[in-house]
Image (cartoon, rainbow, N blue to C red):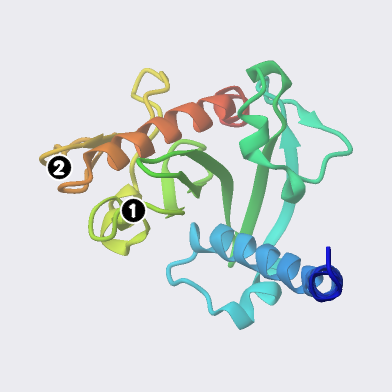
């Protein structure tokens, strides 16, 4: 290696080290802000499932502190698990475990004398993860509202799961039938029965995402069945 090549090699190595150090430092400095944004977004999604209007981001911290009066984790028997912060539970990881080993988050929302229970849901859409929160009335059966989102569903098709026109019809639907059997909510292609308490319209052209969301609701909410029934006695 001649002198010219040696200089270029050393210069390149030094620049790589400097750039790596700068990027690493920037990542460490930015991480607290990134973590805070993730936390606010999560609180926003929780609140959006129960509030009539999606709150402004600037108000999220205050509203969450005032209205989410309790949170805890349960097992699939409906028993409260001690020492677990519901907000920190990663439902994606929990759903990979056997039902008996899962920690299931529960959030209690209280406002103007009304109380709602909120649970998270997560699943797999057509192109990536889908997730959300479902809030219930105090009968532990009737859906008060939902908040869904996605990472990479098709714009104008599956991506419509986070639009109001798709989410609004979930309000008032029930997850148990008249006999008390868990039936969840069916997302129907071609139009739901307007008289059904367990059906909503699917997304035209977004059948795969619609059915994936239906499966997400079944898979996640059934884990809370024992808890809901125990609270409704």
Q: Is residue 110 left or right of residue 131?
A: right
x then y, percent, for residue 2: 84, 69
At horizontal 89% and vertical 38% (from top left) the residue drawn is: 83
Residue highlighted by disc 2? 194
Instruction: Give the number of the disc on residue 127.
Output: none
x then y, percent, for residue 12: 79, 71
Residue highlighted by disc 1? 161
At horizontal 28% and vertical 55% (from top left) the residue drawn is: 166
* One can see residue 22 in this view: no
| Front in this rendered view, residue 170 or 180 | 170
Quadrant that contains the N terminus? bottom right
For marks 2 and 1, the one nearer the N-term is 1
At horizontal 50% and vertical 49% (from top left) the residue drawn is: 132
Instruction: Nearest to the eye among marks 2 and 1: give it.
Output: 1
Q: Residue at the bottom extreme?
A: 58
x then y, percent, for residue 22: 82, 76
| Front in this rendered view, residue 221 or 219 | 219
Name the image quarter holding residue 125.
top left
Quadrant that contains the C terminus? top right
x then y, percent, for residue 158: 29, 50
Q: Is residue 37 above or below residue 204?
A: below
Q: Is residue 121 above or below residue 223?
A: below
**Which element carries disc 1, helix, strand or loop?**
helix
Name the image quarter holding residue 97.
top right
């Amino acid at each position: 290696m001649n002198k010219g090549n040696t200089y270029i090699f050393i210069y390149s190595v030094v620049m790589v080290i400097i750039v790596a150090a700068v990027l690493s430092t920037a990542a460490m400095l930015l991480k607290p802000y990134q973590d805070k944004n993730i936390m606010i977004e999560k609180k926003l999604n929780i609140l959006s499932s129960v509030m009539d209007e999606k709150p402004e981001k600037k108000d999220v911290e205050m509203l969450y502190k005032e209205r989410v009066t309790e949170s805890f984790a349960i097992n699939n028997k409906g028993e409260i698990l001690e020492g677990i912060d519901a907000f920190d539970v990663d439902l994606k990881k929990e759903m990979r475990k056997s039902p008996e080993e899962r920690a299931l988050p529960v959030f209690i929302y209280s406002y103007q004398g009304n109380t709602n229970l909120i649970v998270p849901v997560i699943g797999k859409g057509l192109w990536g993860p889908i997730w959300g929160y479902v809030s219930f009335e105090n009968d532990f059966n009737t859906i008060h509202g939902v908040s869904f989102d996605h990472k990479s569903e098709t714009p104008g098709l599956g991506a419509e799961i986070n639009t109001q026109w798709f989410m609004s019809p979930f309000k008032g639907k029930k997850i148990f039938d008249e006999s008390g059997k868990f039936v969840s909510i069916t997302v129907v292609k071609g139009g739901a029965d307007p008289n059904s308490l367990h059906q909503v319209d699917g997304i035209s052209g977004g059948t795969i995402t619609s059915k994936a969301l239906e499966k997400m609701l079944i898979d996640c909410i059934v884990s809370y069945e024992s808890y809901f029934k125990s609270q409704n006695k």
